[in-house]
Amino acid sequence: MNRRKIGSAAEDAAAAALRRLGYRVLDRNVQFAFGELDLVCEHGGVVVFVEVKARCGHAAGDPFEAVTPHKRRQVARLAEAYLQRRRLWARACRFDVVAVQLDRNGTPLAVEVLPDAFRL
């Protein structure tokens, strides 16, 4: 399974899990010149920027470890650009991470949501 299909399957699984938890998905794959936001949601009146990390098998390591300090700064810059683009300056926001474990065919085996995963 190629990287794009893995990413799409993981984002689908993450969005479904978040909806079950009461999140409202506002946007997916929001493109900027310097990167992409995986999911933007609303939960309890808060704008939530969600980084989705997928793994096929355990050999690749813990998905949460892939959200490095550099990645956190990048997501924060993207979030700031999103808030400006959508004119949502005054909205409270947070950063969640969703880890999705997939089998070789892209079927989700487990989805773990880590709310308020990091702060800057």
Image (cartoon, rainbow, N blue to C red):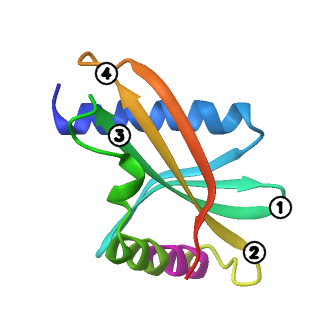
**Disc 1 vs disc 3: which is toward the camera?**
3
Q: Is residue 4 left or right of residue 112?
A: left
- Residue 45's label in the rendered image is 1
The N terminus - image quarter: top left
Dots 1, 2 in contact, CB < 8 A: yes
- State the residue position of label 4: 106
Reading the image, the residue beneath label 2 is 92
Residue 45 as seen in the image, left or right of residue 55: right
Which residue lies most toward the left here?
Answer: 2
SS under mark 3: strand
Q: Residue at x 26, y 28 (%)?
A: 57
| Residue positioned most to the right | 44
Q: Nearer the viewer, mark 3 or mark 2?
A: 3
Dot 3 amino acid type? Ala
Q: Is residue 102 magenta?
A: no
Among numbered discs 3 and 2, the one appearing first in the sequence:
3
Gap in Å between the C-alphas at discs 3 and 2? 27 Å
Q: Which residue is mark 3?
A: 54
Q: Residue at x 58, y 76 (%)?
A: 119
Question: What number is the disc on residue 64?
Answer: none
